[in-house]
C-alpha cells in the first residue's frame, strides 16, 4: 500500500513536525556502525523526520532512542511495548530492501518472531495512530464496541493508514480511530484534539463511547 508521508500524517494529527524533531543523520550512521548493520530506509526516514518527537513516540509504546537500538536474531529492535513485554524488530542489512516487514517477539524469547506488518513504513504510521487512540498523544480519548455501521463509516469517510497484527488504523483531521478485536468483541479506540470532536464520533461512527479520562 502507499503509506501516507510522515509529515502529512503528523499534520493531520494536529502536530506539525518541527526541525527539532529530526535526528541527526550522523547519529543514525553511528548507531548502524555500532551494530554493524544498515537500518532500512523506511526506518531511517522516520527518525530523520520525527525521531525526537517524543510527545508522540514515547507517550505509550516506546520508539527507542538510537543508543538503545539492538540487533536480535538478525532483526533491528526499535520499538518496545509500554511494559516491555514485547518488542518489535525490522529486517535490516542490504538484503532487506528499503521497506521490509516488521516482526514481534516476547522480551524473554527473542528467537520466536511473528510477522505483524508487511512493511516498516505502514507499521510506523499505524503505530503512531495507536499512540493517539490508545495512548495519550492526542488529549482526548475513548473507546466503545463497534456498532453495525462503524466499519462502513470508517471506510467511507476516513483515510486508511494501515494494519498491524489485524489492528486497522484510520485518521482524519484532528481525529483517529483504531479497530481492534478485544476481549469483549470488535472495539474502536478513538482520539481527538478536542472534547467536542471526540464525542461527535459517537454518531459519526455508530459507537457508544466510554471515556478513558
Image: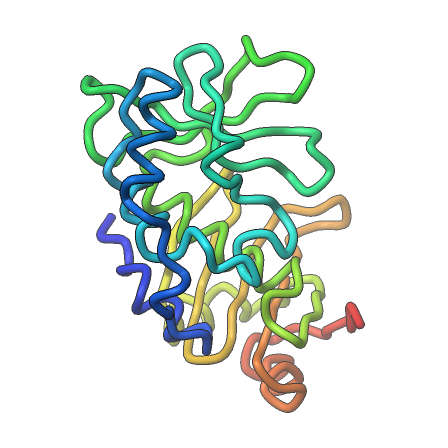
Q: Residue 46's x, y, as percent?
A: 34, 49
| Residue in the foreground of this view, choosing between 159 and 111 | 111
| Residue in the foreground of this view, choosing between 185 and 107 | 107
Q: Is residue 61 above or below residue 6?
A: above
- Residue at the (41%, 47%) spot, across then down: 124
| Residue in the foreground of this view, choosing between 188 and 51 | 51
- Residue at the (28%, 40%) spot, across then down: 26
The image quarter containing residue 106 is top right
Q: Is residue 15 left or right of residue 18?
A: right
- Residue at the (48%, 79%) spot, across then down: 174
- Residue at the (63%, 81%) spot, across then down: 198
Q: Is residue 133 left or right of residue 164?
A: right
Q: Residue 2's x, y, as percent?
A: 22, 52
Q: Is residue 203 above or below residue 34?
A: below
Q: Is residue 108 above or below residue 50?
A: above
Q: Quadrant of the C terminus?
A: bottom right
Q: Residue 77's x, y, as percent?
A: 48, 27
Amino acid at each position: 500500500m502507499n503509506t501516507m508521508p510522515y509529515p502529512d500524517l503528523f499534520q493531520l494529527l494536529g502536530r506539525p513536525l518541527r526541525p527539532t524533531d529530526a535526528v541527526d543523520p550522523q547519529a543514525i550512521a553511528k548507531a548502524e556502525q555500532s551494530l554493524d548493520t544498515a537500518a532500512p530506509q523506511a526506518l531511517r526516514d522516520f527518525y530523520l523526520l520525527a525521531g525526537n518527537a517524543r510527545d508522540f513516540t514515547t507517550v505509550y509504546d516506546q520508539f527507542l532512542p538510537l543508543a538503545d537500538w539492538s540487533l536480535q536474531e538478525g532483526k533491528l529492535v526499535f520499538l518496545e511495548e509500554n511494559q516491555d513485554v514485547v518488542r518489535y524488530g525490522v529486517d535490516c542489512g542490504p538484503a532487506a530492501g528499503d521497506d521490509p516487514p516488521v516482526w514481534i517477539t516476547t522480551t524473554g524469547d527473542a528467537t520466536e518472531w511473528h510477522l505483524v506488518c508487511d512493511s516498516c513504513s505502514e507499521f510506523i504510521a499505524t503505530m503512531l495512530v495507536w499512540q493517539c487512540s490508545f495512548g495519550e498523544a492526542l488529549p482526548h480519548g475513548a473507546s466503545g464496541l463497534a456498532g453495525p455501521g462503524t466499519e462502513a463509516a470508517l471506510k467511507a469517510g476516513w483515510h486508511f493508514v494501515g494494519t498491524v497484527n489485524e489492528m486497522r488504523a484510520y485518521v482524519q483531521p484532528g481525529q483517529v480511530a483504531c479497530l481492534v478485536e478485544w476481549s469483549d468483541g470488535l472495539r474502536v479506540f478513538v482520539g481527538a484534539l478536542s472534547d467536542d470532536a471526540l464525542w461527535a464520533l459517537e454518531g459519526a461512527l455508530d459507537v457508544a463511547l466510554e471515556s478513558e479520562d
